[in-house]
Image (tube, grey):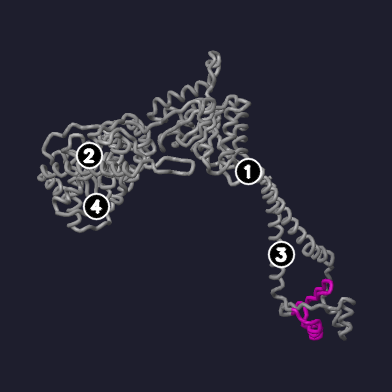
């Protein structure tokens, strides 16, 4: 149909082009002809200044002896010779003329009819046809409005788009859970013979970037079945009922291609809890959710279909969606540990020319808390940095610099600071580093720099060499003391503090509040102190004024203790503070080996931590 439309339009344009060219040529041919009254041609005949005469209907063209052409219109009632006789031209002069008669009246009439009738009809017909075509297209789009927007990957056609479990590094437990789903799809008889039912739904839960979508694609690839993938937001439209219609169409289409996998990303966009008082019973989101519930476990069971869904907000999902028979399994994807980070780095390092001295283990140690997407972005930033410096390979320093960029932002090399401000920043960061080094339960100092990045004038990077899931009271106390290191270093060195400690104080206060409110580590005891509790009418205070005052006093006491600890540590090691600050003023960046050499002793026993901490 599209080819036919193009041919019609091409034909119309060709006809119009011919008409324009023909008219142009006619105009050009008439460019050397001067139109005169018929009497002028008679005078030229009387003066014997005519070579030839061409008569076409009522038009007379006379070619003069100097090759000029004059054109005149005669009276239509008589012939050319009769017109000459009427003007008194003699028989001898008429006999001496070379007269050529052309009769093209029929073609002129046909051409005139074509121009005046056929061309307008052709143009109007084309306009009507185009309008009808647009209306038909609009109707077609309206009919498609309720169709599913899901994309489909067919294993036999889209092999390049498919990934396998081998392409997914880490996530060992999650892959084991999903390998059973693959086995269900490839060999269902094995399970049905023993009375087991195929799970109808699997919910992938985890922070952003942990590989939920990648795992879903790997399941479809390993099972070699069609993979329908869409997003929860594609079902939410302005008109009520469209989302439910698209859900019906999605399941209907997938059932025709069963066994198949349906993957719904960001399920919380349509799967939020109902009855919260928002949107009402006719809300589009609720209608879509109702249809999902029916399709997954209604009166008619879907045969050969497994629904995979991903979300990082399982707490907001409706309870009916989470019950057995709908999403039978919940697979949790955590942030990768140090071994998994190393495996992920190896996967993303493929195709990137790393130098032999690059240690992915060290990079994995420097990146606790990074997701798979973060690690991919990290190596990409390292490759961009290497290319910027016209290198042919990526070295260890490029990757370490990229870690700093991902965590803190790019270096602000254009920022010009005075020597006084540079000195203040150096003592500030030295205060953090020295406090962290000499406190037993603080994490090892990996790097200290006064080069500005992002909004920070400098930063101290402290992180463990291993991952830890549990944080002790002693670690919290050490972290709070280290957070005050810059503040106290400015105070004991310059006698006053600057605004550079504002972010440190904010982090310190957050840690102290968590210490008291959520973890029960203060003298108030093991009680969870949340600010508000939810009610049908909104949020209401959860505690009395007296309790809130006690919480504030407990937070203040903890911060005062951290301040005293920090001040004693820096006072006892003021020579190390001075030494490190001067080294920072000179070199601007101090890595861990140089730092420990400046401290002049064996590194303290390292303690693991869950994520890196940058103290600015």
Secondary structure of residue under mark 2: strand
User: Which residue is more in the foreground, 76 or 19?
Assistant: 19
Residue interval drawn in magenta: 35-64
- Closer to the N terminus: mark 2 or mark 4? 2
- Closer to the N terminus: mark 2 or mark 3? 3
According to the picture, the residue beneath numbered tag 3 turns out to be 22
In the image, is residue 552 above or below residue 44? above
According to the picture, the residue beneath numbered tag 4 turns out to be 500
- Closer to the N terminus: mark 4 or mark 1? 1
- Closer to the N terminus: mark 2 or mark 1? 1
Q: CA distance from mark 2 to mark 1?
A: 56 Å
Q: Which x, y percent locates residue 476? A: 25, 37
According to the picture, the residue beneath numbered tag 1 turns out to be 145
According to the picture, the residue beneath numbered tag 2 turns out to be 446
Q: Residues within 10 Å of mark 2 (few under 14, many from 20)?
A: many
Identify the residue shown where x is 77% and y is 82%: 49
Q: Residues within 10 Å of mark 3 (few under 14, many from 20)?
A: few
Secondary structure of residue under mark 4: helix
């Amino acid at each position: 149909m599209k080819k036919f439309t193009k041919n019609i339009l091409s034909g119309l344009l060709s006809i119009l082009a011919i008409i324009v060219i023909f008219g142009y040529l006619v105009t050009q041919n008439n460019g050397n002809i001067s139109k005169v009254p018929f009497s002028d041609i008679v005078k030229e005949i009387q003066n014997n200044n005519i070579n030839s005469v061409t008569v076409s209907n009522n038009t007379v063209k006379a070619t003069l002896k100097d090759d000029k052409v004059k054109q005149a219109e005669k009276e239509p009632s008589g012939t050319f010779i009769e017109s000459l006789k009427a003007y008194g031209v003699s028989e001898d002069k008429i006999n001496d003329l070379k007269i050529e008669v052309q009769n093209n009246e029929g073609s002129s009439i046909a051409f005139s009819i074509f121009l005046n009738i056929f061309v307008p009809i052709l143009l109007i017909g084309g306009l009507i046809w185009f309008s009808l075509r647009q209306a038909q297209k609009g109707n077609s789009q309206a009919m498609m409005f309720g169709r599913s927007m899901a994309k489909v990957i067919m294993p036999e056609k889209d092999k390049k788009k498919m990934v396998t479990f081998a392409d997914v590094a880490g996530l060992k437990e999650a892959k084991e859970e999903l390998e059973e789903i693959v086995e269900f799809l490839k060999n269902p008889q094995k399970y049905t013979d023993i009375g087991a039912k195929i799970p109808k739904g699997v919910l992938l839960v985890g922070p952003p970037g942990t590989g939920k979508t990648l795992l879903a694609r790997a399941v479809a690839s390993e099972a070699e079945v069609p993979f329908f993938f869409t997003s929860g937001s594609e079902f939410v439209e302005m008109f009520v009922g469209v989302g439910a219609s698209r859900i019906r169409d999605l399941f209907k289409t997938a059932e025709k291609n069963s066994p198949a996998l349906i993957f719904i990303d960001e399920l919380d966009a349509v799967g939020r809890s109902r009855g919260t008082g928002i949107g009402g019973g006719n809300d589009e989101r609720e209608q879509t959710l109702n249809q999902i519930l029916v399709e997954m476990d209604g009166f008619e069971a879907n045969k050969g279909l497994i629904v995979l869904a991903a979300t990082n907000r399982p707490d907001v999902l409706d309870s009916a969606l989470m019950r057995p028979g709908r999403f039978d399994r919940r697979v949790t994807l955590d942030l990768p540990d140090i071994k998994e980070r190393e495996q992920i780095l190896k996967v993303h390092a493929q195709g990137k020319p790393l130098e032999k001295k690059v240690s992915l283990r060290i990079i994995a140690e420097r990146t606790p808390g990074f997701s798979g997407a973060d690690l991919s972005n990290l190596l990409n930033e390292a490759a961009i940095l290497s290319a910027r410096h016209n290198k042919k390979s990526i070295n260890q320093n490029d990757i370490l610099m990229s870690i700093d960029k991902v965590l803190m932002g790019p270096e602000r090399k254009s920022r010009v600071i005075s020597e006084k401000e540079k000195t203040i920043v150096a003592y500030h960061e030295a205060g953090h580093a020295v406090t962290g080094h000499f406190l037993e339960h603080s994490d090892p100092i990996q790097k200290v720099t006064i080069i500005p990045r992002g909004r920070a004038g400098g930063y101290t990077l402290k992180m463990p060499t291993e991952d830890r899931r549990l944080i002790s009271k002693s670690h919290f106390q050490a972290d709070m003391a280290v957070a005050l290191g810059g503040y106290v270093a400015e105070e004991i060195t310059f006698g006053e503090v600057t605004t550079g400690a504002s972010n440190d104080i904010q982090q310190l206060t957050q840690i102290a509040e968590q210490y008291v409110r959520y973890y029960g580590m203060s003298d108030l005891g093991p009680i969870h102190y949340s600010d508000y509790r939810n009610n049908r009418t909104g949020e209401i205070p959860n505690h009395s004024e007296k309790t809130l005052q006690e919480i504030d006093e407990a937070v203040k006491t903890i911060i005062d203790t951290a301040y005293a600890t920090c001040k004693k540590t820096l006072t006892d090691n003021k020579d190390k503070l001075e030494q490190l600050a001067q080294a920072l003023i000179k070199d601007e960046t101090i890595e861990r080996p140089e730092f420990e050499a400046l401290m002049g002793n064996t590194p303290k026993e390292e303690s693991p931590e869950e994520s890196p901490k940058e103290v600015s």
